[in-house]
Amino acid sequence: MSFRSNPTPSAADRWVRSLLGSTGDTGVILLTAEGEIVGWLGAAARLFGYSPDEAVGMPLSRLFTPEDVAGQLDRQERELALSGGRSEDDRWHVRKDGTRFWGSGVMEQVRDDDGAVVGLAKVLRDRTDVRTMVVALQNRLVAAEQQNADRLKAIASIAHELRNQVSPLSNLLGALEKSPAAMPASASMRRRVQSMARLLDDLAEGAAVVAGKPTLVVEAVAVQRLVLDALASMEEPVRQRGQSLRATLPDTSIVIEADAQRIDQVLVNLLANASKFTPAGGVIQVSATVEDDMAVIRVEDDGVGIAPDMLPRIFDLFSREARPDAPDGLGVGLSVVKQLTELHGGFVEGRSPGRGAGSIFTVRLPLRQPVPAHRPAGAADAG
């Protein structure tokens, strides 16, 4: 078989007609601008079950589902193609026998030799197999997310139960510490009990926040106040580790709509994380500013830094860097930071030049939108 590299117009027309007559999966529907079918080509008859004689003269809406027709999506598709030149769509279509298939196609303008629009052409294929696969994957994802949420709720419940057992141990230690002979041992036990309590609190809070998506109690609050409150909470732990805590805050108030308690939790977690990974003599710097329509809070440290391969996973629940000198923890604090920040419509990012070079965590939260002054209906501008 030989092919002409430059077929004549008549030969090219025969090729197109041959293709449309032999294709088994691509349907071509020709329409008037008003949506009446005037051409039924290719695999259109096989896809929809209508013969050309039955289809020609029908409205395009006959091929749409009743719910899409009620939403005037058939008309919208035509109007979009007429105004913009083409319209792409993936939707359910209805066959003659009432069954449905997922059609993926495009509708384009048809022009005459003078460039005037004389109609529309819709080309589509049956991609029910792809749609079925996508829906199956979506269902599996939803099921997996629900299963994960159930596990996290169970973890939070277990952590709370274990935390309840820590309180009696702490009370017994209080009695033991009254004996001078038991002081050295009881002091060591006290530190271990306190460490266990912190781990359980982190576990319960992290699992609960990720699984439960707590309701926010939102109010207008100044970022400076939030930062100063968080600094006050961390001042003593940071001092005990021999670190310095510094803040750079603007004089002009930065106001956001937020749950003050939850943002305090975000900032304290970031400060605690910075302190945990910063050696004695290190500096933790907090700053706040405005960038475009976002309030920006940065927590920087000159600590151990973050390895490049760890950066993409730092906000994952239970994610911890596997190294011998890593401090105690379950890897939930930064996950809580991410979840709570996103609940406020913001986002958080972490950066580090690398191991030993410190880290920077940046929280961005939407600024409070100004409330427009009330203006009585019919009031005229002063002029």
Image: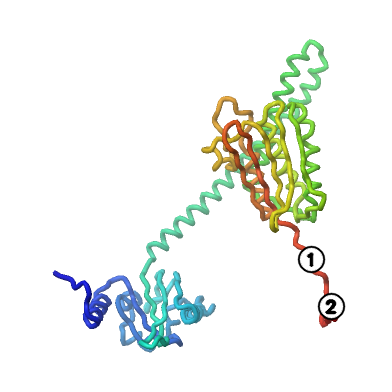
In-front residue for pair 352/233: 352
Residue 56 screen position, x and y as percent: 35, 87
Say the numbered circle drawn on residue 171. Answer: none
In-front residue for pair 33/362: 362
Helix, strand or loop under label 2: loop
Q: Amino acid under label 1?
A: Val
Compared to residue 239, the image places residue 91 above or below, namely below
Is residue 105 rendered to the left or right of residue 25? right
Residue at 80% across / 51% down in the picture?
Answer: 222
Would you name the residue on which mark 1 appears?
A: 371
Compared to residue 77, the image places residue 279 above or below, namely above
Residue 105 screen position, x and y as percent: 40, 72
Location of residue 331 (image quadrant) = top right
Would you name the residue on which mark 2 appears?
A: 376
Residue 36 visible in the snapshot: no
Helix, strand or loop under label 1: loop
| Of the image marks 2 and 1, the number of the one nearer the N terminus | 1
Residue at 58% across / 47% down in the picture?
Answer: 149
Is residue 256 rendered to the left or right of residue 20? right
